[in-house]
Image (tube, rainbow, N blue to C red):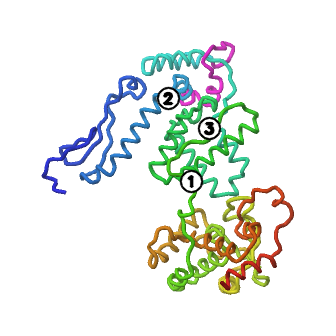
Amino acid sequence: MDQKMPLKLPRYVFRRPNGSFRYKRNVPKDLRPVIQRTTVYRQLGQTYDEAMSALPKVHSEIEALFNRERRTTDADRARALIRERLGDVAESMFMGDGADPEWPDYDDFQELAEDIEYYVPKGVAEQIRATRYKAPPMNLDRVLDEYAAYKDVEGDVGLRTRLERLRKDLKTSMGKHRYEWTPLAEVTRADANAFRDLLLARMSPNSVQRNLGVIKAAINHVLLEHDLDIRNVFQAVKIKGAGSSKNDRLPMSEEQLAEIMPAFETSEIAKTIFILLTDTGARLAEITGLETRDADLDQGLLHIRPNGRRGLKTKNSTRSIPLSPRATECLKKLASARSDGEPFFPQYAAPRGSDKASAMLMKRLRSVISDKKITMHSLRHRMKDKLRNTGCPEAVSQAILGHSSNTVAANYGVGYAHKTMREHMKKVWDF
């Protein structure tokens, strides 16, 4: 773009004397006592194109800031100040409708109220002056803590990482103090929608749905364990465009499989992972985290189970499945250079290792196939379709793929015999 031509700039955008672009927004009068400034600024970039690219995100962040502050009550702000200045114990004493002069540090609240009286809204100082004992309320921070303990996230790196990201995003959308101190009963649908909108700005609707699913599960767990009669405001949040579709990912055809195979044969690691994905239908993270002890190469069996390098997606993901002859040979080559307990794929057997493996595999796949509906996960769809088309019973297919079953009876016993699985998988291998 010719920078000498006059530019018609959107609202809140102006150009500085040095040529860069800036976002300038007046703080609404009702928020100035809490934001404590009349104008907020954000840098947008050095060029017009950079500024226009950054503008939607910056504008969304400022709107979220204003909306968040409007939803934050005087009690929320009082809690935040007490925690910051007086600590956790003092915060637990805060209630807002009275004071107990018998409490040894009662005077601390009065002194804090005097210190901040002229710098915060009047109601905040009044809340701090009135304090007596109160047990800490159940809030979203405690919800995620209790859910993490229940799920034992120390043994599940993927869930631990997701919960850490959820905490960060909830603090951004709700505000740190509202997230940490607002009772769960006072969290609103507006809070849930604000969180949804924050995620939609950077990820797909289906990814947003998965993240909301974790929060819903965490809240439901706490409501049940504590026998709380509180509505889960994260339940049934509307997400436009979310939902599974058979066209989200396409199965890989036999022609495409033959076409891309040479792209993986230049690396023993890439070839082995590709063959394992093709012949087992397993998830990529299940394969990249395999240790040598997880493969019984004499019997041609693969034990997919949690280990110190990664957990599994669901309880039903733990399973033992037959290996094809070519997959067995590939693993034998790798096992010969590794001791018992070592990972088959050390460069990918680490937190986020499956993401790195996915990038490596997708680079090879995209060198041949450009259709975005064909990905490495298409191999799992392929196995599902092949099992169905060769007459494999649905229950056996679920056992092979590690899918959750909706029937209670399916969870009894030790599962299908490896011989039965092999008979149906062999039809796919020889298809």
Question: Where is mark 2, residue-wise?
Answer: 71
- Image quarter in which the C terminus is found: bottom right
At label 2, the amino acid type is: Arg
Question: Where is mark 1, residue-wise?
Answer: 243
- Whether label 3 touches label 1, CB < 8 Å: no
Where is residue 151 drawn, in percent x and y? 71, 50
At label 3, the amino acid type is: Leu
Question: Where is mark 3, residue-wise?
Answer: 140
Query: Is-magenta flag for residue 90?
Result: yes
Label 2: few (<14), some (14–19) or many (≥20) C-alpha neighbours in 10 Å: some
Q: CA distance from mark 3 to mark 1?
A: 26 Å
Left or right: 226 in relation to 431 = right
Residue drawn at point x = 42 percent, y = 17 percent: 118
At label 1, the amino acid type is: Gly
Q: Nearer the viewer, mark 3 or mark 2?
A: 2
- Image quarter in which the N terminus is found: bottom left
The image shows residue 421, relative to residue 239, as above or below, that is below
Find the magenta span and give its range: 82-105
Residue drawn at point x = 34 percent, y = 49 percent: 54
Where is residue 139 drawn, in percent x and y? 63, 34
Q: CA distance from mark 3 to mark 2?
A: 16 Å
Q: Nearer the viewer, mark 1 or mark 2?
A: 1
Q: CA distance from mark 1 to mark 2?
A: 30 Å
3 or 1: tag closer to the N-terminus? 3
Q: Quadrant of residue 353?
A: bottom right
